[in-house]
Image (cartoon, helix red, strand yellow):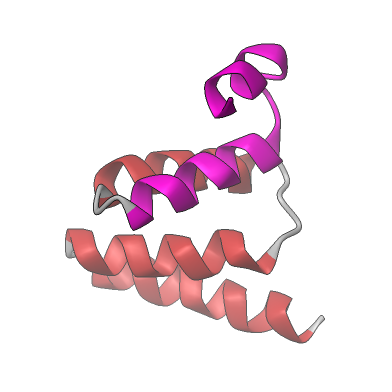
Amino acid sequence: LLAACAADDPLSADVALAQGILAFRADRPRDAVGHLRRAASRGSREPETWFYLGRALTRTGDKDGARAANAVYARRDKA
């Protein structure tokens, strides 16, 4: 179903976010990072984009990237 949504709307930030969350939960953090970065670059307004991006980056060992994503999450979560 998600693949069909991605095919129907390949520029959707919401679809990229959903793909990123699913990849993260399936213990595929590198895939998750790619999807979540796409969601962010497509203008996702959901704080979960940066929450999961921070967690996925932590799992890949990118501590600086994780800190940056977590800082964005903290600002977005308060909005």
Residue located at (17% from left, 65% from top): 61
- Magenta residues, start to end: 1-25
Q: Position of residue 54 (x, y in %)?
A: 41, 68
Instruction: Decide: is 29 above or below 56.
Output: above
| 69 up-or-down from 49: above or below | below
**Dominant SS in magenta:** helix
Position in image of residue 44 (x %, y %): 71, 50
- Viewer-closest of 47 and 42: 47
Picture quadrant of residue 12: top right
Question: In which quadrant of the rendered view does residue 73 lie?
Answer: bottom right
Q: Examine the rendering and report whether any part of residue 64 can be seen.
A: yes
- Look at the image and say whether residue 9 sits in the magenta stretch: yes
Give percent across and percent down for residue 25: 36, 56
Q: Residue furthest left?
A: 61
Of residue 54 and residue 28, the one placed in the foreground of this image is: 28
Residue 79: give x, y in percent of width and height: 82, 80
At a point 22% along the width and 65% down the height, the residue shown is 59
Residue drawn at 53 percent across, 21 percent down: 3
Q: Is residue 64 above or below residue 24?
A: below
| Vertical relation: 42 (above or below) 65 | above
Q: In this rendering, would 41 be left or right of 3?
A: right
